[in-house]
Image (cartoon, helix red, strand yellow):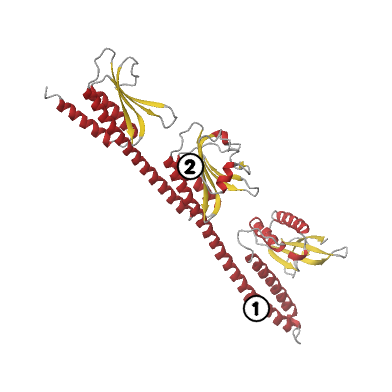
Amino acid sequence: MTAQPAPRLTRLLEALLDVGTDLDLSGVLQHIVDGAAELTGAGRAALVVVDPGGGGRAEFRAPGPDPVPETAVLLRAPVLVGDEEFGELRIARPPGSGPFTAEDEQLLRVLAAQAGVSIGNVRLYETARQRARWIEGAAAVTTALLTEEGTEDALATVAERARLLADASAGVILHPTAEGGMEIVTASTPDDPDGMIGATIAPGSPVLEQLLGGEPVFLDDSATDPRMTTHVRHRFGPSMMLPLKAGGRLIGTLALPRRRGGRPYTDVERLLATQFASQAALALDLADARRGRERLAVYEDRDRIARDLHDLVVQRLFATGLMLESTQRRPGADDVRDILGRAVDELRSTVQEVRSTILALRQPPGEAPTGLRGRVLRETASAAARLGVAPSTHFRGPLDTRVPDRVADRLLTALRQALAEASARPGLSRVQVTVETPAALPEGNDGVRLRVFLDDGTGGAEETGGGGQGTAVTWWAPLR
């Protein structure tokens, strides 16, 4: 009679050790059920828990998957994780068997108590792993944002990494619109994102008021929540909408929706995702500031080069031209007068080209030019690859102030057409574009004139300043 408790105590310690050392929740729950069946000698054992994935109930059974018969003799013990009732541990004997003993009940309660401790430890371990993954993800996003160039790439990086970390169906970035709403500008999803880009949240939406105020929004079901107004909401279930806010400025919103019927987000996931969004917003702000500093440095360097060209090169060329013109007027210069004249014309042409370069350098990088001079330079620069030569561009007169926008648009259309036709000409060695105003038109009134000279060795037109034979295309229009 005294030899029986020792083996049972040994098995209890072994069962507690199995339960306490496993860090996988499913493994822990199965060890609990197996230990309960073995320790009590019960024919069946089951652990009934609330299923966090679907909101229903799930069972872990031993020794097989069959349910416990309703007529079986049952013994129950609650499994508590802290103050939360996680589930219920049950053991059963076949109908007609004798009742469970007090020792069986005590063993079951000890095992249930240890199960609660082990489940709590597994949860802490999973939380720590989750936190580590989010921290690593935030660090990776920060590194990527501070090394990437484009804003669109930066937003896509944030959306993709957040989607993977949150195990979401999509990662979406929304930007505030001029009308007061929000629009999806970036979407990361393993499925077809058809219809997502451009979807908007209408102004006045309760969700929008929270987001614009910098507050996160958590939805149990995006498809049925009356606060959601986007036309893609029916695709998704649980969702987090997190403001990307840095330095008191709302950059946008990070939305992480799961599929309809998907697992709800836990409090820990909501906290970690909110912290990730805050760090991502800061990284986006820093990346934007870095790009701004780089653009400013480039612009300052271009401005310095433009000043040097204007103050040094142009002035010296101009002075040299004056010296040559003075030499032309000296007695006895008849023999070299033609040569000096061509040299003066070349210097004037060079000065025009340098001034065009100065104008291009003073155009802020990455911005569309606003004046006619800058727009002409952009057209000629983009045509250089097709032409095989870089066009020489000359301007005369106050083009940016005298030529109206509607006339400038027509001039640019004519320029594009002339350059497109020039790219099809063989043997093209030089292209000279001249825009001038005021220019006397055939009708006698003032206007603007465009002349595109193509030095291809054919035709009877002569290049301005001499030095080439080819074809000239001329376009003009009145200023009014």
Dividing the image into 4 quarters, which one contains the N terminus? Answer: top left
Label 2 packing within 10 angstroms: few (<14), some (14-19), many (20+): many
Q: Residue at x 56, y 62 (%)?
A: 295
Secondary structure at badge 2 equals helix
Residue 163 place in picture, x, y as percent: 48, 42
Q: Which sits earlier in the primary sequence, circle 1 or circle 2?
A: 2
Identify which amino acid the numbered label 2 is placed on.
Arg
119 relative position to 41: left or right: right
- Mark 2 — residue? 163
* Nearer to the camera, 282 or 220: 220
**Quadrant hosting residue 299:** bottom right
| Observer-nearest of 281 and 465 | 281
Q: Is residue 203 above or below residue 85?
A: below
- Which label is found at residue 118? none
Q: Specify the farthest residue to the bottom.
A: 331
- Mark 1 neighbour class, 10 Å CA radius: few under 14, some 14 to 19, many 20 or more: some
Front of the two marks 1 and 2: 2
Tell me the residue at 43%/45% (across/down). Answer: 272
Q: As rendered, which of 162 and 440 lies closer to the eye?
A: 162
Residue 334 lies left or right of residue 161; in this view the side is right
Q: Seen in the image, is 239 located left or right of residue 179?
A: left
354 relative to 130, above or below: below
What separation in Å lies between label 1 and label 2 (alpha carbons)?
Answer: 61 Å
Residue under numbered circle 1: 316
Q: Position of residue 165 (x, y in %)?
A: 44, 42
Callout 1 amino acid: Arg
